[in-house]
Amino acid sequence: MFKNLLKKSSTPIQLKAPITGEIVPLEKVPDPVFSQKMMGEGIAIIPKEENVVAPADGTIIQIAPSKHAIGLKTNDDMEILIHVGLETVSLDGEGFNVLVEEGDHVSVGDKLMIVDFELVRNKVPHIITPMVITNSEQSNKEYNLTAETECKAGQTSVLTING
């Protein structure tokens, strides 16, 4: 009788868009590391605005030395990587203004960085921005991409995680 009371509730987790733009399935990212999900499950967005925000509540666990990527660990231990553009590591931080530090606690919608896409767009192959759950392989959760095609940073749910 009490068995079901002790079960953990498996409320779906909603990840919000880290940036405003066009939603693209991860499989369509023109980089096999992302499209073949070598780094994990996720989505990608072709940015239309410069602000990158937190897709969930959590703690900043990594900022790439070249400032093009930020790692976040959610309160339920999901590790999320937001990777702005492809081959942006080569810019060595040019065009990226990171507003947080490792160890900072953030809430959904908090601004993480501002990207000068005019500058970046002309120096890299693509500005598509993948968001991947880097520890997704270690869980048996189900990842569902939204049916939406456009998203607003910090507001649109782009990925639902069940399990």
Image (cartoon, rainbow, N blue to C red):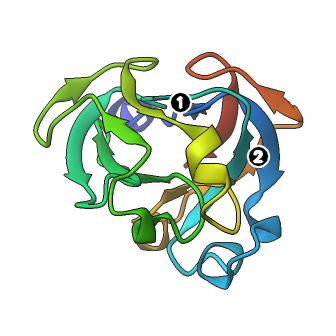
- Quarter that holds the N terminus: top left
Q: Position of residue 88 (x, y in %)?
A: 49, 64
Say above or below: 120 vs 39: above
Q: Secondary structure at mark 1?
A: loop
| Alpha carbon separation for disc pair 2 and 1 | 17 Å
Tell me if 162 is positioned left or right of 125 in this view.
Answer: left
Coordinates of residue 12 in the picture (x, y in percent): 58, 34
Which residue occupies the foreground of this view, 54 or 77? Answer: 54
Category of crowding for the residue at label 1, using alpha-carbon neighbours closer than 10 angstroms: few (below 14), some (14–19), many (at least 20)? few
**Residue 151 in the figure: left or right of residue 119:** right
Residue drawn at x 62%, y 16% is 155
The image quadrant that residue 151 belongs to is top right
Amino acid beneath label 2: Leu
The residue closer to the viewer here, 45 or 67, is: 67
Residue type of the residue flagged with mark 1: Thr
Q: Is residue 1 visible?
A: no
Looking at the image, residue 153 sits to the left or right of residue 134; the answer is right
Where 72 falls versus 49 (above or below)?
Answer: below
Q: Which residue is mark 1?
A: 11
Q: Residue 22: where, in percent of width, then height?
A: 82, 38
Q: Residue at x 20, y 49 (%)?
A: 61
Badge 2 crowding class, 10 Å Cα cut-off, few under 14, some 14 to 19, many 20 or more, is some
Say which mark, if any, is on residue 141.
Answer: none
**Circles 2 and 1: CB distance less than 8 Å?**
no
Going 73% across and 31% down the picture, which residue do you hit?
A: 48
Q: Is residue 99 visible?
A: yes
Q: Between 57 and 154, which is closer to the camera in this rendering? A: 154
Residue 57, how many percent across, how many down?
Answer: 34, 26
Q: Which element is circle 2 on?
A: strand
- Residue at image mark 2: 145
